[in-house]
Image: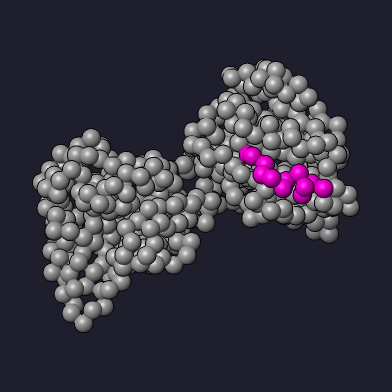
């Protein structure tokens, strides 16, 4: 084993990320006895010229024939320009922290795929490996375009070739936070989750085909696989019905039985499932901030009002999953949260529906102060001032307040005296809402809600779930708290 310092080249690609590069490249340039290659991939900010003017010792490779962005191609170009036995692929928005240079001095295994551990999503593509190991598998697959998956494809092929995953301390890297729009700016498909599904299916189709028909994996063959993977996933986009894909393999003859043959095919079914959401640790009555995540790389830090009420709400929402997503045929696009409080339910919906737009309504001044800050963290969410300035506005004119929103996919109403007037006001629209969540604070209120909705939704919805919440086991049943969830029959996907 040998250290990688004195024999390593940093590979950085840039297209529209000059502001990030100005923060990260000086840190890389300070690592002694290393090389650095920056690939200016038709960067509209002329990042390569900036590098040449400010860091003349850094090699710049220019790509001028692609109006989009292909990260695989950009990294391969950078690797081809390197002359060192070790490569470090690192994005323009990743800062190296003090201690990284010292870590490079430690002995390394020649077959190591070195990545941050524990790895966070922004660091996923940062990797160190031997140049010969990278070249032996053909580098990154340039058929993979769009956001995500090119790194997983490379790691999979390198593992198949005998390389092993080895971690280095994640605190040695620091991602620069930025909006998702920057990630997909130069890609035709802006939905990064959708693009990642396409690339994921392509990678595993290719991996499986390699075992049965490796001769098919020419550039033309791989492009055909990508075209079919894209068509299959895009056809199922926006729904939870499975995306079905079959690969026909060559027939097998049986020499001893000339009138027999074996037909073979590989079948793939992809189906979207609800993502779980949870708190990082139990919430106490003295907490002023909480952290929640969905296990898929999305973490939210929220400010809350300390107290037992908040503690109970967090337990109900993030541990009890009282707002669990129903299996619906369409992924919700627009969510309305009336009585949003500080945004706990909105945060839960963000964790299970990453791409939905969330509209929050709240009238309590203390909660509003925190809600305005939390919706920034939640992202793609807003506080609607029409029904947040007074307690009366949200109930008396709910139909008018929501007139700007042609389609409501999910409606949530917190337990309050105004819930019934709001539901009554919205009655003309209720049948068109895919899922309706209504809290109740007593048996009396529950009965009034079920009576109103049972009549209004008689021909359109089913009561999918009724849950008693924390504190609902009081000796006095009239104090029972809970949530009723009604789901549109046409939108509901029955469990198989």
Q: Is residue 327 positioned above or below 384 on the image?
A: below
Q: Which residue is drawn at 61% across and 44% down?
A: 174
The front one of 496 and 344 is 344
The front one of 249 and 155 is 155
Residue range of the region highlighted in magenta in the rendering: 94-105
Q: Which residue is drawn at 27% across and 52% down?
A: 367
* Number of numbered markers: 0
Q: Quadrant of residue 428 in the image?
A: top left
Whole-percent x and y of residue 293?
Answer: 48, 55
Q: Which residue is drawn at 64% across and 55% down?
A: 118
- Please state if 379 lies on the left or on the right of 55 as rendered: left
The front one of 228 and 36 is 36
**Is residue 442 visible to the viewer in this orientation of the structure?**
yes
Dividing the image into 4 quarters, which one contains the C terminus?
bottom left
Inspect the magenta stretch and tell me whether residue 220 lies in it: no
Q: Which residue is drawn at 49% across and 33% down?
A: 181
- Please state if 426 lies on the left or on the right of 493 as rendered: left
**Is residue 455 visible to the viewer in this orientation of the structure?**
no
| Figure coloring | one colour
Q: Is residue 326 positioned above or below 101 on the image?
A: below
Whole-percent x and y of residue 343?
Answer: 33, 51
- Please state if 170 lies on the left or on the right of 297 as rendered: right
Whole-percent x and y of residue 415?
Answer: 21, 60
Q: Is residue 71 positioned above or below 389 on the image?
A: above
Q: Which residue lies furthest to the bottom in this view?
A: 475
Whole-percent x and y of residue 186?
Answer: 55, 27
């Amino acid at each position: 084993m040998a250290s990688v310092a004195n024999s390593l080249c940093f590979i950085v690609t840039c297209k529209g990320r000059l502001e990030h590069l100005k923060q990260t490249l000086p840190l890389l340039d300070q690592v002694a006895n290393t090389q650095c290659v920056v690939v200016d991939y038709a960067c509209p900010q002329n990042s390569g010229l900036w590098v040449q003017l400010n860091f003349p010792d850094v090699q710049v490779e220019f790509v001028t024939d692609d109006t989009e962005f292909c990260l695989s191609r950009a990294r391969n170009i950078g690797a081809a320009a390197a002359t060192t036995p070790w490569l470090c692929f690192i994005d323009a928005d990743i800062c190296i922290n003090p201690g990284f240079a010292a870590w490079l001095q430690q002995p390394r295994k020649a077959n190591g795929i070195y990545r941050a551990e524990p790895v966070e999503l922004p660091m996923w593509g940062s990797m160190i490996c031997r140049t010969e190991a990278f070249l032996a598998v053909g580098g990154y697959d340039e058929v993979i375009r769009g956001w995500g998956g090119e790194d997983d494809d490379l790691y999979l092929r390198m593992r198949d070739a005998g390389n092993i995953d080895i971690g280095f301390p994640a605190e040695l890297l620091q991602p620069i936070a930025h909006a998702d729009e920057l990630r997909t700016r130069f890609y035709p498909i802006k939905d990064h989750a959708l693009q990642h599904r396409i690339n994921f299916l392509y990678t595993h189709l290719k991996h499986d085909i390699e075992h049965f028909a490796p001769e098919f994996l020419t550039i033309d063959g791989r492009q055909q696989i990508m075209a079919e993977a894209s068509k299959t996933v895009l056809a199922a986009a926006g729904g939870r019905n499975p995306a079905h894909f079959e690969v026909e393999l060559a027939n097998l003859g049986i020499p001893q039985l000339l009138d027999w043959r074996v037909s073979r095919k590989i079948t793939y079914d992809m189906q979207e499932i609800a993502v779980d959401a949870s708190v990082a640790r139990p919430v106490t009555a003295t907490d002023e901030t909480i952290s929640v995540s969905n296990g898929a790389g999305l973490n939210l830090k929220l400010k809350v009002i300390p107290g037992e009420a908040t503690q109970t709400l967090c337990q109900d929402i993030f541990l009890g999953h009282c707002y669990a997503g129903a299996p619906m045929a369409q992924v919700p696009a627009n969510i309305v949260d009336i009585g949003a409080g500080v945004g706990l339910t909105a945060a839960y919906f963000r964790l299970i529906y990453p791409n939905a737009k969330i509209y929050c309504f709240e009238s309590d001044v203390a909660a509003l102060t925190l809600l305005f800050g939390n919706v920034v963290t939640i992202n793609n969410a807003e506080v609607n001032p029409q029904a947040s300035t007074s307690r009366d506005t949200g109930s008396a004119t709910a139909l008018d307040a929501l007139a700007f929103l042609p389609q409501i996919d999910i409606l949530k109403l917190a337990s309050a005296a105004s819930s019934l007037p709001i539901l009554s006001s919205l009655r003309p629209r209720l049948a068109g809402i895919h899922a309706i969540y209504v809290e109740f604070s007593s048996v009396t209120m529950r009965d009034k809600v079920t009576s109103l909705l049972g009549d209004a939704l008689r021909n359109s919805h089913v009561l999918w779930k009724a849950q008693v919440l924390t504190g609902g086991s009081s000796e006095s049943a009239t104090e029972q708290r809970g949530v009723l969830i009604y789901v549109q029959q046409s939108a509901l996907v029955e469990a198989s």
